[in-house]
Image (cartoon, rainbow, N blue to C red):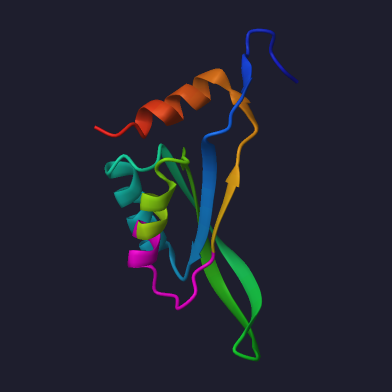
Amino acid sequence: MSDSTTNWIQVENLVEISTTFPDDIIADDVAEVLVQRGLVACAQVSGPIQSTYLWKGAYEQCSEHKLCVKTTLERMPAVVDLIRSRHPYEVPEITARRYHWMTEDYASWIIEATKPT
């Protein structure tokens, strides 16, 4: 239910990027570096999650931790580069989705937190 004081806006330049890591230690480290460098406004690590997938012709199952970050389209290339540089997987899952609607104050916070200095 929406509060009458909540201002929803359409956004075009904000994204959520997600990836998975084999453990929470690596995921937490990457999350911390991304926030400290101002590349993302927020990083959330969840898990463990159970993943089942086909890899090189064999079915695999493993426990992973998911990292989701909020940033701008402008910062997305640097975020992806940092994730790739610290990722132990040969082919890491890195996906992004654009936000369409967001509360105005949250959108403003993401933009301000990721503004290049």
Magenta residue check for 90: yes
Q: Can you see residue 66?
A: no
* Residue at x 37%, y 26% (from the top left corner): 112
Vertical placement of 3 versus 32: above or below? above
Image quadrant occupied by the N terminus: top right
Which residue shows up at 53% across the image and 68% down it? 64
Specify whether 103 is left or right of 2. Answer: left
Q: Residue at x 59, y 89 (%)?
A: 56
Using the rendered image of the protein, determine whether residue 85 is visible from the camera's viewpoint.
yes
Residue at the far bottom in the pictured view: 57
Q: Where 75 falls versus 80 (above or below)?
A: above
Residue 60 on the magenta segment: no
* Magenta stretch bounds: 82-93
Residue 98 found in image quarter: top right
Residue sticking out furthest to the left = 117
Q: Position of residue 8 (x, y in %)?
A: 64, 19
Q: Which residue occupies 30% across, 51% down?
A: 33
22 or 40, which lies in front? 40
Q: Total number of numbered labels?
A: 0
Is residue 115 placed above or below 29 in the rendered structure? Answer: above
Q: Position of residue 21 (x, y in %)?
A: 46, 66
Quadrant location of the C terminus?
A: top left
Question: In the depicted view, which residue is nearer to us: 75 or 49?
Answer: 75
Which residue is at the far right? 1
Residue 6 sits in which quadrant?
top right
Query: Farthest residue in the top direction?
Result: 5
The part of the image, by quadrant, that contains residue 74 is top left
